[in-house]
Image: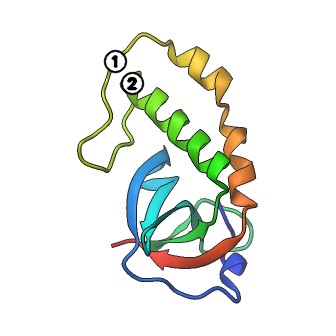
């Protein structure tokens, strides 16, 4: 999650649509969103600089511009977790649930820390949850 200070100097964006999420706590925390015909990584912003998990209402997110390789990797991660039956699809049609891979193996392949690098990608702006 980002502290509110991360919004400084970034433009507010409209017409952003979340495509899928990878983390959830009473709502999406991270995932992929579409803006202006492109896909970006979104990260929730907390309303204080202490990193406490208190969020804005409605939630606020920062969009990060991932490289093509990072975005492909994020989609691969999403499809793998969805195939194992975990929620996250906000798109239609949703990912196919195939089963097969064990959740532990997926978490080993893509530990939560894996997404930390996405948070450091260039930020293009921020948006409010619809």
Nearer to me, 54 or 91:
91
Mark 1 and mark 2: Cα distance apart in space: 5 Å
Which residue is label 1 attached to?
98
Which residue is label 2 attached to?
83
Nearer to me, 22 or 41:
41
Tell me where residue 91 appears, x and y as whole percent: 30, 50
Secondary structure under tag 2 reads helix
Which of the 4 quarters of the picture holds residue 123?
bottom right
Q: Are marks 1 and 2 in contact (CB under 8 Å)?
A: yes
| Residue drawn at 24 percent across, 47 percent down | 92
Quarter containing the C terminus = bottom left
Tell me where residue 114 appears, x and y as whole percent: 71, 40
Nearer to me, 88 or 27:
88
Which of the 4 quarters of the picture holds residue 74?
top right
| Residue drawn at 63 percent across, 65 percent down | 65
Near mark 1 (Cα within 10 A), the count class, few <14, some 14-19 or many ≥20, is few
Quarter containing the N terminus = bottom right
């Amino acid at each position: 999650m980002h502290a509110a200070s991360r919004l400084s100097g970034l433009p507010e964006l409209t017409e952003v649509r979340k495509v899928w999420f990878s983390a959830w706590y009473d709502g999406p925390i991270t995932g992929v969103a579409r803006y202006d015909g492109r896909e970006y990584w979104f990260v929730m912003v907390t309303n204080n600089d202490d990193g406490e998990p208190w969020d804005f209402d409605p939630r606020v997110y920062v969009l990060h511009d991932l490289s093509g390789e990072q975005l492909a990797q994020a989609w691969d991660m999403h499809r793998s977790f969805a195939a194992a039956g975990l929620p996250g699809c906000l798109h239609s049609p949703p990912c196919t649930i195939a089963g097969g891979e064990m959740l532990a193996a997926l978490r080993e392949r893509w530990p939560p820390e894996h997404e930390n690098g996405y948070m450091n990608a260039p930020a293009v702006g921020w948006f409010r949850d619809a």
